[in-house]
Image: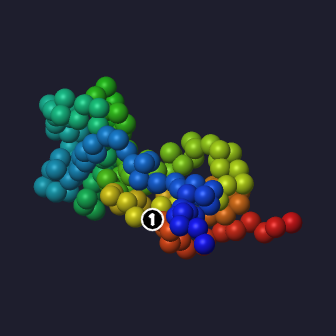
Amino acid sequence: MSDQLINRVASSGLITIKLEDYFPPYDIISLDLKDYLFRGLILKEMDFRAAMKDYHWDSVNGKLLTVFCSTDAIIPTWAYMLVAQHATPHVHSVYYGTKEECIRTWFSLRIKEMDAEEYRDAKLVIKGCSEKEVPASAYLEITAKLKEVASSIMFGEPCSTVPIFKRPKN
């Protein structure tokens, strides 16, 4: 018997994908339009235009901006357009919705952009634990995308995985 230790995980050919690496590299700032409602009910055009003109847009330079209204008020479509008109010279990107919706959209776009062919016939482990909370939608979308090319997909850590998909042998 050999005294040599063999790292079976390293020699298994598994490729680990860390969805955490797809997290937005920018700070996310939220703009809740409820703060601009007259009596908490309506958005007055002239007041809103003035507020957007006076907003400290420098405070969002290079960041992701999410725009939403947390109340049941009806926000006219032009209001979102006006925010985008003022924000786009300053922000990296502007998104409709909450911070969580922004993160889901960000992940979805990154997964759509990824080259699945890079993982053709690979044994993949989609890492489960991470420092940041990865949305469940990202796990759904990456599995749907990579299932078409990978030979197998597992969830977890290389030393402890949950089998998700295995291509049948022909």
Q: Position of residue 149 (x, y in %)?
A: 71, 54
Q: Position of residue 40 (x, y in %)?
A: 16, 57
Residue in the foreground of this view, choosing between 8 and 90: 8
The answer to which quarter of the image holds residue 93 is: top left
Furthest toward the right, the residue is 170
Residue in the foreground of this view, choosing between 116 and 57: 116
Determine crowd level at label 1: few under 14, some 14-19, many 20+ residues with C-alpha closer than 10 A.
Answer: some
Would you say 96 lies left or right of 45 here? Answer: right
The amino acid pointed to by label 1 is: Gly
Would you say 39 lies left or right of 83 here? Answer: left
Locate the C terminus by quadrant. Answer: bottom right
Q: Position of residue 117 (x, y in %)?
A: 68, 45
Q: Mark 1 highlights which residue?
A: 128
Residue 116 seen in this snapshot: yes
Badge 1 element: loop
Would you say 65 lies left or right of 1 here? Answer: left
The residue at 45%/65% (across/down) is 128
Q: Position of residue 81 (x, y in %)?
A: 36, 37
Locate the N terminus by quadrant. Answer: bottom right
Furthest toward the top, the residue is 89
Residue 139 seen in this snapshot: no
| 96 up-or-down from 161: above or below | above
The residue at 28%/62% (across/down) is 72
Residue in the foreground of this view, choosing between 81 and 153: 153
Residue in the foreground of this view, choosing between 167 and 141: 167
The residue at 53%/71% (across/down) is 161
